[in-house]
Image: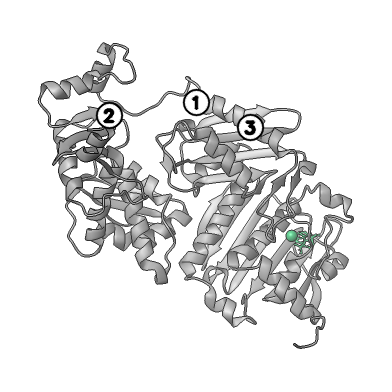
Amino acid sequence: MAKIRELPPEVQTRIAAGEVIERPASVLKELIENSIDAGASEIDIVLEKAGKNLIRISDNGSGMDENDLLVAYLPHTTSKLSSLDDLEGIRTLGFRGEALASIASVSHLRIESRSEGEEIGTYIEVEGRQLLKKGKLQHKKGTTVEVKRLFYNIPVRRRFLKSDSTELAWILDIINQFSLAYPEIAFILYHEKKELLRLEKTKNLAERIERVLKIKINNFIFIEHYNPIFKLKAWFSRPEISYPDRKAQFFYVNRRAVRSSMLYHLVSSAYREILPPNRHLQLIFMLEIEPKLVDVNIHPTKREVKFRREKEIYDILLNVLKENLTAPKVIRETGKSFYQEEIKEREIPLQENQLSLSQLKYQEEKASFLYYKDTFIIFIRDDKINIIDQHSAHEHILFEKLMANINGQLPEKEKLLLPEIIDLNPAQAIRVRQNILLLNKCGIEMEEFGENSFILRAKPTWLKQDIKKFLQDVILELEEDNFKELEEQKKKLCASLACHAAVKKGDRLSIAEAEKLIQDITKTKIPYCPHGRPAIITIDLKKIEKEFLR
Ligand code: ADP
Ligand code: MG
């Protein structure tokens, strides 16, 4: 084996950079953090080629004077902490003094800055640890950081970057993430000289959330809680809006976007009783807590956090959330039809296992099946008792239909009487553009209509809900393109469309609809919904006889 040597300093920094700087979005994340830490109230971002060729960010924060600027780009230089003690109670977004050094080691870095007390600003140009140029220039108070030709010296990294639109979508996700936590900061983004985003500053957090996520905050359940160790502000969607993953969930601890298995577990437990398994509410969760009680120094990009006194915090939070999410004041808005209301009024309280009025009605009309809890359809065929879960079954049937459409079978669709226009945020618009061919194949006829808007002209005939609302839900789950895994992308899109279009547990089906479902599901090959839940359970007569010891 070769002799052990210490690596040259440039190599050390470049290896360290690998942990923090993965792609343009991670550069931008670090730079936005610096601007926020410097107290900026306006952050302007200019990109070329999705940040691969240029990222320029200007802020109106505190700025740096010449002395500070001349050390800022060196490894382990920071103004944010000075001792081990400080590490125990971090109040800033940055603290390791690594970001600028890492960025300098993998790009051409130029920084211009002027601090409050100075008449004239300073600029430096750096490559690795080498100062290439420095000088004086006019600059407003604040800092401009320019990162050019990212990974020019690590060709493998550069080759591994995704398409411009995918990288851009990641960048927009990062900006969205910060903008939700910092409504008092204006964010402006230009890409290839086009303005992609302009968020004015506002004092009102709810207003910023509505703007960024394109939601109506009044449809959300607002939860606020204060106690001596933490403050919580959170918005949860109602159970009617849920997703198969956590993409629509935003968690913040002390205004830092975080991942935390503790918080994931917490919210899932809080809505376990009101959602089917593996579904997640949309939510914005903002926790302010004494900095000494969180450790943000456990992950290279500072995204993961750990709590001290975790159990105590967890228990309080769980109580607060459950109280708010499952309390009777939360009215389910399922848009029940008049017919269902009628039945409800005449309904006599029932024991769990008695037949409900709707079931009796089905029996009177000699339906060939039993309908239980507006969810399960039970029928006997070939000496087998079959139980269908209406949601899983419908989802599965739609999924197969959609996959066939994508693979060439023409969709059954109908023109909308009035075309609908949907406005999206830029990140969502990119994802729609990347999936638009597939969507069209599925019978969702739409095209671009201005900057971040699309016009919808036709919908698939099987879609019963409002197409606009339906699409908005689906769009939140769209994946970025990934050419190598196109098959995977197709499947995910179809699964998402099928899940949102399928009848839900508790939606009452007509006799004809239920019979159609029986017919269709018994024809499909593998009766599982795309999420892997069975769509039909079968109990053999032989098994029943055996149970009765016959
Ligand atoms: P960290 O943020 O962990 O301190 P960085 O490498 O990101 O490390 O930045 C090093 C230092 O440069 C910061 O501590 C700060 O003093 C200064 N700095 C960086 N960006 C800015 C900015 N936009 N405005 C003012 N000061 C900045
Ligand atoms: Mg920093």
In the depicted view, which residue is nearer to us: 544 or 20?
544
Q: Is residue 280 left or right of residue 467?
A: right
The quadrant the N terminus occupies is bottom right
Q: Could you tell me if residue 537 is visible in this image?
A: yes
What amino acid is found at the position of numbered circle 3 in the picture? Leu
Q: Is residue 434 left or right of residue 11?
A: left
- Which one is earlier in the sequence, the residue at label 2 or at label 1? 1
Residue positioned most to the front: 550
Vertical side of 109 occupied by 311: above or below: above
What amino acid is found at the position of numbered circle 2 in the picture? Asp
Vertical side of 507 occupied by 19: above or below: below
Q: Dividing the image into four equal quarters, which quarter contains ligand 2?
A: bottom right
Q: Quadrant of residue 97?
A: bottom right
Q: Could you tell me if residue 207 is visible in this image?
A: no
> How far is disc 2 from disc 1 in space, using C-alphas?
21 Å
Tell me whether circle 2 and circle 3 mark residues in contact (CB < 8 Å): no
Q: Look at 65% across and 68% down and name the residue there.
A: 21
| Element at label 3 | helix
> How far is disc 1 from disc 3 in space, using C-alphas?
14 Å
What amino acid is found at the position of numbered circle 1 in the picture? Thr
- Which one is earlier in the sequence, the residue at label 2 or at label 3? 3
Q: Is residue 309 left or right of residue 225?
A: right
Q: Look at 14% across and 39% down and name the residue there.
A: 381
Vertical side of 6 occupied by 23: above or below: above
> What residue does disc 1 label?
326
> What residue does disc 2 label?
374
Checking the image for residue 317, the label placed there is 3
